[in-house]
Amino acid sequence: MAVGSLDFGRSRVRALWPLPAAFALGALAAGGQAPLGLWGLTLAGLLGLTWLVATAPGWRWAALTGWAAGAGYFAAAMFWIVDPFMVFARTDGWMAPFALVLMAGGMALFWALAGGLAVALGGADRRGRALGFALAMAGGGLLRTYIFTGLPWALIGHVWVGTWVAQADAIAGPVGLSLLTALAAAAPVAFGPVRGLIFGWAVLGAAAGYGQWRLGLPMPAPRAQTVRLVQPNAPQKLKWRRDYAPMFFDRMLRQTEAPGAPDLTVWPETSVPFLLNRAGEGLKLISEAAGGREVALGIQRTEGMYAYNSLALIGAGGKVQQVYDKHHLVPFGEYIPFGDLYFDITGNPDFAPSQGYGYTPGPGAEVLDLGPLGRMLPLICYEAIFPQDLRTKTRPDWILQITDDGWFGTLSGPYQHLAQVRLRAIEQGLPILRAANTGVSAVIDAKGRILKSVPLGKQGIIDTVIPGALPATPYSRTGDWPVALVLLLGAGALLAGRRRRRRG
């Protein structure tokens, strides 16, 4: 009996080997994300994972395999999630490991769903499972973009930023890029090594060919007006300290006063140590530093008990000309979900934005008319990761993002954020100017190329003209509806094939 028990234990251990293997494959696939950008690792990791799912004994095991891989992927790709808790490590650091575990495990549920759906769509057929897994992985990315306010960070398709393939984003969007990637990785499992590799390279080769052609198209002339982007490099742990905040404010004033006389100067998100409605002489000092020319700055403001994370455009004498309030807020970072509902039920205001706890969302995306500078779409930090937030009734001439990426650390978070901003430029065919507190501030053209930048962790300014805009792209007109339809049709075809195999 002892021997039998020992043998049973060993068999259980042997049976569990796909789970650590899946975790490792998921972590390997994360190597394609910024800053590494090793997309070959992503294809290799997804190929191995597809084989594990396609050969799993049932849907439960396939789902568990998908979850393990997703946990490895998101733990490796989004380990920067610990950095916000380490800014004030003495009080918040204890939460960092829990945040990483919960985030990776929660996001991995979308990969678990993909594994289970692969078996549901393909049945016992390895080809059907492999193709079903590719469809479901892209579908999971689509769900992540929208449900629970959305978090489309580290989509598989993001690994192509900076390559020819990324230009296909103008047609298919980031979920479409994810589908192309997943299909290319699944093809050797679905069709055999030789035919699968040919198919996969043909898919990616077609996207790359389109990208090379698009990059070769002539660019329209830039606007004549100039913009200055200010990067003060105020470390997050020092930014609001009373002994440092005046120093950082003076630094931005000096950067604004530097020779060049731009038509517009841009300060990053939450860049000043006072409220818009309690600015005192602050706005006048900024206007004087700019020589009376316009300044767009990130600033907080309040109306009664409501607080807003805003961008304000000020003119001569510090007069406020236009205000945009951030509308897509960070859950648990800028507000507590259902905080107002909790207040209505319990009377406890501790989580209610309407009672001064957290920010209140603005009314929505808004295009600001800057006269000779054209129509500008403002984005504040996190809003730039949502493609749907850039679709407005009036098409802007350019996009401005102000952000404070000091919360994201110095290893991967700021670079992944920048990579997603580059995709927004490709999707819309519009240039993006980006002013970041600690970096990376950048000028990005309508094809997603970085023309100028200030490195992470440095202070500096960028004086630039506004690059020209391209015509509206297919994706900017349709959004994710076409790829959603493709996913539904593909799933339907796989289900029909499964029924035919059963009848046969």
Image (cartoon, rainbow, N blue to C red):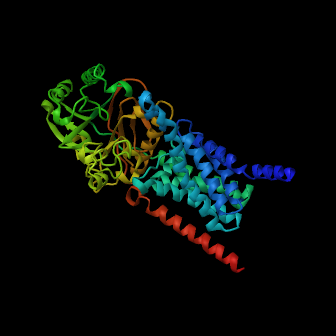
Q: In the image, 140: left or right of 425? A: right
The residue at the point 19 percent across, 35 percent down is 276
x%, y% of residue 398?
32, 44
Q: In the image, 97: left or right of 251? A: right
Q: Which of 181 and 355 is in front in this view?
A: 355
The residue at the point 14 percent across, 35 percent down is 319
Q: Nearer the viewer, residue 89 or 238?
A: 89
Q: In the image, 362: left or right of 124? A: left
Q: Nearer the viewer, residue 49 or 368?
A: 49
- Would residue 454 be seen by someone viewing this image from the given angle? no
Number of numbered discs overlaid on the protein picture: 0
Q: Locate the C terminus and report the quarter of the image it occupies.
A: bottom right
Q: Quadrant of residue 418?
A: top left
- Would residue 303 be seen by someone viewing this image from the given angle? yes
x%, y% of residue 472?
37, 54
The residue at the point 61 percent across, 75 percent down is 496
Residue at the far front in the pictured view: 1
Q: Nearer the viewer, residue 247 or 394?
A: 247
x%, y% of residue 45?
65, 47
Q: In which quarter of the image is residue 462?
A: top left
x%, y% of residue 443?
38, 35
